[in-house]
Amino acid sequence: MQVVLGFVGLLVMVERMVFFQHARTKVADLLLGITNHVRKKAYAEALHEASRARGPEARVIHSILMRHHLDRTNLREIAQEAGQLEVPRIERYMRVLLGVAMLAPMLGMFGTVLGLIEVFMKVGAADSAVAQAALAGGMFQSLVSTAIGLALAIPSYLVYLYLYGKAQRMLHRLERAGIETVNIVCDSREHDRIVSFRDSLEQQATNLESKSKKVSRGPKIAEKKDS
């Protein structure tokens, strides 16, 4: 049983290591490229860049850009929903590894207890010389069972803590990427409104200035006619 646990734990370690290695994304560089495209209203290019990137952060960014026409509140909900869909992928098999770390020493202790029971049964049914040999052999097997359990549990738990830390950091980056993308999209729209409003004010000021010039020219023309 301990061999099976060790094999399962090793498979989980390798699978999670490969996952985190392939899920690495340069979020800062991706957001910089997305920002440049969004400011130019090139949402197709932004979607293409997000789809080319790998990792859960890129998928959340892509989900937000797909619905860039929504308001800030709805975009935040989209980011939260997309992030929640990524959580099971990030935390997959983590409980299995924790289970290996918890079960391995228990199975080792169980093997130790069974070994001691067998030893005492042999000791009670044999003479002194045979009893000493049986006691020594049984104690050795019992201690080996405990040692194997601890040898499986300690590295499994250490790797679990390491992978758990990586998962939490990835979830933090995931949340941050969603917030940053929502801000990029919404701030770009607000900037466009401000620019449009400023252009409108400038146009109104230009129109008023031209009207005032026409009004000021009117009396001068009338004076020339009178003279």
Image (cartoon, grey):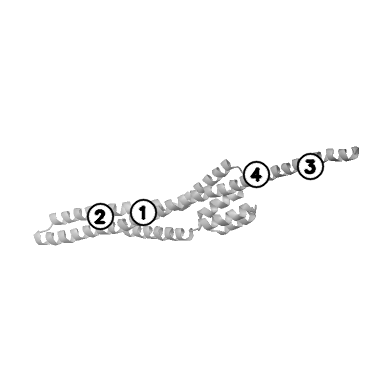
Of the two numbered discs 1 and 4 on the same chain, state the one appearing first in sequence: 1
Residue at which label 3 appears: 213
Residue at which label 2 appears: 111
Q: Disc 1 and disc 2: Cα gap in Å?
A: 27 Å
Q: Position of residue 122 (x, y in %)?
A: 16, 56
Front residue (pair 202, 94) = 202
Front residue (pair 88, 124) = 88
> At 42% across and 51% down in the image, what residue appears?
168
Residue at which label 4 appears: 193
Residue at which label 1 appears: 161
Instruction: Kindly indicate whether the residue at mark 1 contacts the one at mark 3 (C-beta within 8 angstroms).
Output: no
Instruction: Kindly indicate whether the residue at mark 4 contacts the one at mark 2 (C-beta within 8 angstroms).
Output: no
Q: Quadrant of the N terminus?
A: bottom left
- Give the mark toward the camera: 1 or 4: 4
Dividing the picture into quadrants, the one containing residue 31 is bottom right
Q: Answer yes or no: is residue 87 visible.
A: yes
Of the two numbered discs 2 and 4 on the same chain, state the one appearing first in sequence: 2
Q: Position of residue 152 (x, y in %)?
A: 31, 58
Front residue (pair 116, 96) = 96
Q: Disc 3 and disc 1: Cα gap in Å?
A: 77 Å
